[in-house]
Image (cartoon, rainbow, N blue to C red):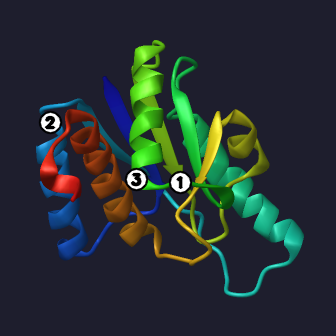
Amino acid sequence: MNIKIIGVGKLKEKYFKAGIAEYAKRLGRFCKFEIIEVPDEKAPESLSQAEMDDVMEKEGQRILGKIKDREYVYALAIKGKERSSEEFAAEIQRLTTYGHSDITFVIGGSLGLSKEVMKRSDDQMSFGRFTLPHQLMRLVLSEQIYRAFMINEGSPYHK
């Protein structure tokens, strides 16, 4: 099984890197886990809608360039479906049972994900209506992926 997180922007904070590295190490017994960073598009503070669309389009093309045809893609989006940890674990189990051994999660930049990335996604996932920094979201997502494997294994980690 291969699990990949594609994130816009560079992770700079050591504490986020350390947390993600810990979950990546733990996930090593269940899957090949990788995080791919794509450059964010530099943009001024105030943008018109057309300029925002242009930024998302450019970031979206970089994201799509990292996704293969066979990958099952979750786009993280505020308007996506919220799940409990148990529901997420069951979804991962179902996907692997039915032949989806390559699962990719996409975390957009500060403006979100392009329409093209959303169209390419097989499902959209939300962690609630909070706005979280994409660096923190990578850590939270990494932990939830690990938790899903532990739930499916019947481990007491989840309790």
Q: Which of 131 and 95 is in front in this view?
A: 95
- Residue identifier under label 3: 85
Q: Position of residue 101 (x, y in %)?
A: 39, 20
Image: 131 above or below 5? below
Image: 11 above or below 93? below
Q: Is residue 21 left or right of residue 58?
A: left
Numbered label attached to residue 28: 2
Image: 127 above or below 148? below
- Residue identifier under label 1: 83
- Could you tell me how far apart the alpha carbons at marks 1 and 3 are, in whole angstroms? 6 Å
Q: Residues within 10 Å of mark 3 (few under 14, many from 20)?
A: some
Question: To which quarter of the image does residue 102 belong?
Answer: top left
Task: Identify the secondary structure beneath mark 3.
Answer: helix
Point 56% across, 35% down: residue: 73
Q: Position of residue 89 (x, y in %)?
A: 39, 41
CB-based contact (under 8 Å), mark 1 and mark 3 = yes
Residue type highlighted by circle 1: Arg
Task: Identify the secondary structure beneath mark 2.
Answer: loop
Question: To which quarter of the image does residue 88 belong?
Answer: top left
Earlier-in-chain disc, 3 versus 2 = 2
Task: Identify the secondary structure beneath mark 1.
Answer: loop
